[in-house]
Amino acid sequence: MRLDRFLGNQPHLNRRDARLLLAGGRIRVDGQVARDGRVEIREFSRIELDDSVLQAGRPARYFMLHKPAGVVSSTRHEQHRTVLDLLEEPDRQDLHLAGRLDLTTTGLLLITNDGLWSRRITHPQHKLAKVYYVETAEPIDAEYIEAFACGLYFAYEDLVTQPARLETLGSHSARLTLFEGRYHQVKRMFGHFRNRVLRLHRESMGPLRLEPGLMPGQYRPLTPEEIRLI
């Protein structure tokens, strides 16, 4: 919310108090004097009035994880181990997934407690490219490339998929780039040709690529530069 609204909502302050405090340079946001009440603040922001802390803030956390097969992309599950179970982090219940992968699918997962950041990854309007390595039971021919580029009709949702890029790597392998994230989308797209997906691995999401040295089940914090890329 806006800083002036946050201040005006404090039990001992009103909107007029907020304007005077801002004009007097008595409010600090993340250690910097703030005079513009229109600035947007978040739950991660530390807000101070003189020597009093109005909001302590909390650290924003961002992780890259190499999801192994057999682990559920969920915060909790009764039958399977979840990706959060792989994290040795405090307050991991505050974290959520920026996009999911099927139980048998491996590869890049991004995990955070920053809802605005994760929505930039998952919201359809941003059309963030997601790249997958695919292996199939039957050969992949040129017909697939054209069909994926035009879009395929999904009867259940009554929609046509967004154009996707398919690059064949071998007779039974390809690299697929999607710009949306429908339910079991990759498997359903190849299923259109009665071709079963044997292996599915997500390599990247937008500018973020799975680190080659990160083994299945391992994770690491994102760097400040990687966070800014989204």
Image (tube, grey):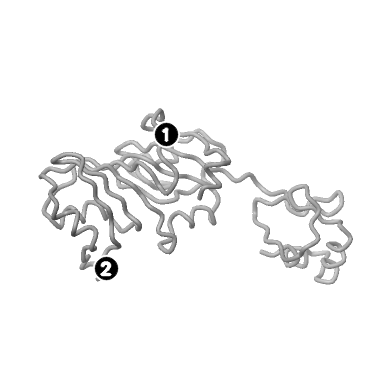
* Residue beneath the point at 30% across and 38% down: 70
Q: Which residue lies under the disc numbered 1? A: 211
* Residue beneath the point at 86% across and 62% down: 21
Q: CA distance from mark 2 to mark 1?
A: 34 Å
Q: Secondary structure at mark 1?
A: loop
Seen in the picture, residue 158 relative to 55 is either above or below; the reply is below
Dot 1: few (<14), some (14–19), or many (≥20) neighbours within 10 Å?
some
Q: Quadrant of residue 184?
A: bottom left
- The location of residue 144, given as percent across then percent down, is 16, 54
Left/right placement of residue 75 relative to residue 158 reads right
Q: Earlier in the sequence, mark 2 or mark 1?
A: 2
Q: Nearer the viewer, residue 210 or 12?
A: 210
Q: Nearer the viewer, residue 129 or 155?
A: 129
Q: Nearer the viewer, mark 2 or mark 1?
A: 1
Q: Which residue lies under the disc numbered 2? A: 157
Q: Quadrant of residue 150?
A: bottom left
Task: Tell me the tag on residue 227.
Answer: none
**Amino acid on which disc 2 is placed:** Glu
